[in-house]
Amino acid sequence: MSRGRNPYECFKNDRHRLFALMSRDVRIVLVVALLGGAGLAGAYPALRSLMAGWMS
C-alpha cells in the first residue's frame, strides 16, 4: 500500500472492508455518547445518579 491512500482500500474482500468501516462508525458513536453522557451527568446531579446506577 502506498502512502496517502485510504487505509480501507487495502482489504481484498469487500466484506472485511465493510466490517472495518462499521466498527469504525460504532466506535465513533460510542465515544461521542460516552463523552456527551459524562458531560450531561456533570451538569445534572439526578442524571449522574441515574447513570451511576445504570453503569453498575
Image (cartoon, rainbow, N blue to C red):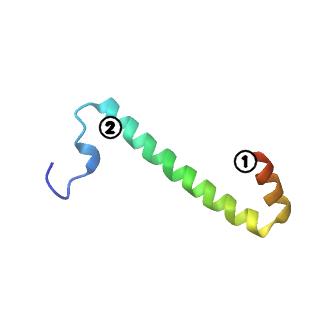
Report the front residue among 48 and 9: 48
Which label sits in the foreground, 2 or 1? Answer: 1
Report the front residue among 55 and 30: 55
Give residue 55's position: percent from left, percent from top. Answer: 72, 47
Give residue 42's position: percent from left, percent from top. Answer: 74, 67
- Sequence-earlier tag: 2 or 1: 2
Within 10 Å of disc 1 (Cα), the crowding (few <14, some 14-19, many 20+) is few
Q: How far apart are marks 2 and 1 (CA)?
A: 32 Å
Give residue 10's position: percent from left, percent from top. Answer: 22, 42
Q: Quadrant of residue 37?
A: bottom right
Seen from this angle, which residue lies furthest front?
Answer: 56
Seen from this angle, which residue lies furthest left?
Answer: 2
Residue at point 33%, 33% (across, down): 16
Residue 21 located left or right of residue 44: left
Q: What residue type is labelled 2?
A: Arg
Residue 49 located left or right of residue 17: right
Within 10 Å of disc 2 (Cα), the crowding (few <14, some 14-19, many 20+) is some
Q: In this view, does 29 lie above or below 36?
A: above
Disc 1, SS: helix
Residue position marked by numbered label 1 in the rendering: 55
Residue at point 76%, 53% (across, down): 51
Q: In which quarter of the image is residue 45?
A: bottom right
Residue position marked by numbered label 2 in the rendering: 17
Given contact means CB atoms under 8 Å apart, are the residues at marks 2 and 1 in contact?
Answer: no
Q: What residue type is labelled 1?
A: Met
